[in-house]
Each structure stands twice: as structure tokens, then as C-alpha cells.
Image: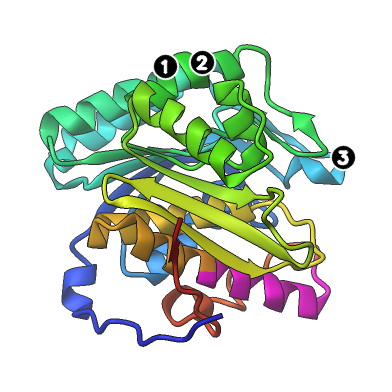
Amino acid sequence: MVRFALPVVNPVLLQLMNILSIQSHVAYGHVGNASATFPMQRLGVDVWPIHTVQFSNHTGYGGWKGRVFDGGMIDEVMEGIAERGVLPQCDGVLSGYMGSADIGHAILSAVEKVRAANPKALYCCDPVIGDTGRGVFVRPGIPEFMREQAVPAADIVTPNQFELELLTDIGIKSIADAHRAVEVLRDAGPKVVMVTSLETEETPADAIDLMAVDSRGSWRVRTPRLDVSLNGAGDAIAALFFTHYLREQSAAAALSKAASSVYGLLRRTKEAGSREILTVAAQDEFVAPSQLFEPEAI
């Protein structure tokens, strides 16, 4: 763990960023937009959330109420936003859990509309498919849609290790394997890849690695392993990484800040013994992480 000074940023400039976030939402707890929106807002981003589902709580509880929306609803909301004449002010689009391929097509249509209005806008796709231990937990057709359409359309992707392996058909046991898989993704379209959790033969048993690659190189951040299993952490780190990358255009800096913030968030959640991540109670971690981890070139 390395401590370093956070840069001083003019708070007025922070208000100039707008991000359209299209993903799931829950009334109770913090996953999807309920996990991603507030951290971005805490960093001074004006977030325009569109929900792909509206559930009472995340599905990890085993029971929930609510429904998955269709692509037509996404299109309709996008049309209303466009009618306000604000799409040229949108700096980026973030997508997460899609629910169905129909919603996926609507998300890519939204990305096209934003890019047409602002060619500098970036699209960050969090390719939510599954996780180690749980396997694939999305509906049939979503993994194929991610591989064939969403990932190639993205500027930035933020898979976990399971998703990276599934998207590239490469088993990852070493950093060399991870590099190979990331380059397969980058060849498909996105130029920036951030792997939200990585365990290789080089990873100590008491640690977890995160990896980011852009045109400048490859970096790793290693944090202590926390004995927790919480929903929504991946949604938060994708949002934080995207926000910091849009500001600094550096995968290394974005990885360091996002990983440090989420480590602090998870540590405080573990200390509190909470089943839901403490998105609001631990909000200071988003702007001034209590522990800062410096990126290492790999």
C-alpha cells in the first residue's frame, strides 16, 4: 500500500461532466444504478440514470419483486432526453446489467445517439454476465450479445476475470494469460480494459489484483483480500473507473483511484457487518480514500 496526495480539482469543473447510466436498479440496497449513480454524483458528475429493471432488492436474496423493462422503454426515455437538446453535453454512456438482448440493442442505439451529438463521448460497457463460483447468471443470449455487439461497440470494458475468460475463450492462470485475453478484447474494439478482479499464480493468497490496460501500457493494483461477498461492488468500481478515466484519460490513475475507493468501501462494510455495501455511510471513500494504492506497471 502506497500513500500519495490526491490532486486538487476545481469543484466548478467537476459539475461540467454528464454521464448517461443505463443499468438495473433496486429500491432496497445497492446494485446497478443504485450502486453506480451516487459515487459518480459524489465525485461531481451529473448522472442521467435509465433503469433496465426495477426490482425491490438484488436477486442474491433469493426472492424479489419487480420487472425487467423492454427495449422500447429505453428508446422512449432516450427520445425524451434528446428532445431536451442536451445530448451534445453528454460526456459518456455507462451500461451494466441488461436483462435481455432487446434492452442491449436499445442501449447501443442510445450510444449511437450520444456519439452523433457528441463525437468525443465514450461508451463504457460493464459486461455483466457472471462470476467465479456462480457461473453465468444472465438470461440466454446475453453472453453472445456482449461478445458480438456490446464489447465491439465500447471504448472501455470492465469485466471480472470470469467474464474476461468467457468473452475471449482464454483460461487465465498467469499475468501473461491475462495480457493475452485483454489484447483479444482490445482487438475487438475497446481500447481500454479494466479487469475488476484477478487471481493468478502470481497473486498472493491474502491479496486480490486489479488490472487496467490502455495505449500507454498495462498496470496492476494489488489490495489486501477482504473476506466478504457483496453484490454491487463491481457496479461501483466500473462507475468510478469510468469517471476518473474521463477526467484524466489515464487507465493507471483511474485504476488506482477506483480500486482504492472500492477497497475502502468494502473494508468499512465488512467492519460494520452489513450485507449491503455502505454506499452512503462510506461516501467519503469516493472522494478521499482512506488507503491509496499506487498502480504498478506490468
Distance in Å between CA atoms under marks 3 and 2: 26 Å
| Residue 33 image label | none
16 left or right, relative to 63: left
- Foreground residue among 29 and 274: 274
What residue would you read off at disc 2?
A: 145
Disc 1 packing (10 Å; few <14; some 14–19; many ≥20)? some
Secondary structure under tag 2 reads helix
Residue at the image point whose x is 69% and y is 50% from the top: 199
Percent across and percent down for residue 2 are: 50, 82
Q: Amino acid at mark 3?
A: Gly
Q: Which mark is residue 149?
A: 1
* Numbered disc 1: secondary structure: helix
Side of 13 where 22 appears, left or right: right
Residue furthest to the right in view is: 62
Q: Earlier in the sequence, mark 1 or mark 3?
A: 3
Q: Which residues are magenta?
A: 260-274
Residue linked to disc 3: 62
- At label 2, counting other C-alpha atoms closer than 10 Å, the crowd grade (few under 14, some 14-19, many 20 or more) is some
Q: Is residue 147 at least partly visible in the picture?
A: yes
Q: Is residue 231 left or right of residue 259?
A: right
Whether residue 272 appears in magenta in the rendering, the answer is: yes
Pointer 3 and pointer 2: residues touching (CB < 8 Å)? no
